[in-house]
Amino acid sequence: MNLIHAIILGSVQGLTEFLPISSSGHLIVFPHVFGWIQQPLAFDTTLHLGTATALVVYFFKDLLKIVSGFVRDVWNFEDEFSKFSHDGKLGLYILLGSIPAGVIGFLFNDKIESVFRTVEYVVLFLILGSTLMFFAERLGKWKRNKKVGYLESIVIGLFQSLALLPGISRSGSTISGGMLFGLNREEAARFSFLLSIPIVVLAGGFELKTSLPALQGITWQLMLAGFLSSFAVGLLTIKFLLDFLKEHDLWVFVVYRFLLAVFLLLYI
């Protein structure tokens, strides 16, 4: 790997982490298609930490309000959830929604990474993820404009666990889950991003620590270049997608994913 490869992979991560087209799938596909040596998983983890940092920076004010509201409500021993503030409730919803992916990732992530990290599986999960987004648009109840609640947070958290499979897409699965249960696209996307922060930060830090011995041949300069490019492109992509979903649907991403799957099938 050289500096150009690191910057390109970081940019790919920043773009595809938030667009519902699967970052993990693209990080597997790019080196395969261009004949690059497959980068170690620890480098991918560094790129994920870059986009996680972009999320924290973009939603920093929101996170401050959510954390302070939740802590204040819990500190005041509010025994009735209805008395929680809006921010306190949102903090609880994020915690509830993080549980499914956290548990499933802790139990099965190593097996998933060892079994499904191939282009063939990426093609399969690209198609399955596109099918999910198709049903979210056609059969979802997103026109109801519901807000996130207990049930919605847990269900969206279950959909988030699908992102462990390369090609599914974290944003695609969680936005689709929200739309299926009544959230509009913009609300589903915003909660999707907020929900991903705890899992991505904690899982990324843990995976980076455990996989550092595998970083042979990857210098700190390459790690930093990948991190910074994923961070910068990620910031721009978050804003783009939230603005895009105010006026547009998910069809363009569904079509792209199907076309990518067809290309990879022909390529393979």
Image (tube, helix red, strand yellow):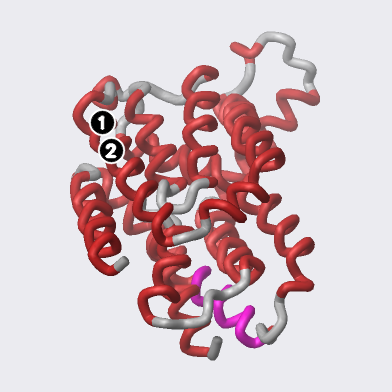
Say which residue appears at 44% left-offset and 76% top-offset: 31
Q: Which quadrant is the N terminus positioned in? A: bottom right
Other residues around mark 2 within 10 Å, as few (<14) / some (14–19) / many (≥20): some
Query: SS at mark 1?
Result: helix
- Mark 2 falls on what kind of element? helix
Using residue 201 as the reference point, say whether residue 231 is left or right of it.
left
Amino acid type of the residue that numbered disc 1 sits on in the rendered structure: Phe
Main SS, magenta region, reads: helix
User: Relative to residue 39, is residue 257 drawn left or right?
Assistant: left
Q: Position of residue 68 (x, y in %)?
A: 69, 37
Q: Are marks 1 and 2 in contact (CB under 8 Å)?
A: yes
Q: Is residue 46 above or below residue 192?
A: below
Q: Nearer the viewer, residue 227 or 122?
A: 122
| Alpha carbon distance from label 1 to label 2 | 6 Å
**Residue 180 x, y percent position in the rendering:** 33, 25
In the image, which disc is placed on residue 30?
Answer: none
* Residue range highlighted in magenta: 221-231
Quarter holding the C terminus is bottom left
- Residue 95, position as x, y percentages in the image: 65, 32
Label 2: which residue? 131
List the single residue furthest toward the front: 268
Q: Residue at x 71, y 58 (%)?
A: 207
Residue under label 1: 135
Q: Give residue 221's position: percent from left, percent from top.
A: 65, 87
74 versus 17 height, above or below: above
Q: Residues within 10 Å of mark 1 (few under 14, many from 20)?
A: some
**Magenta-drawn stretch contains 153:** no
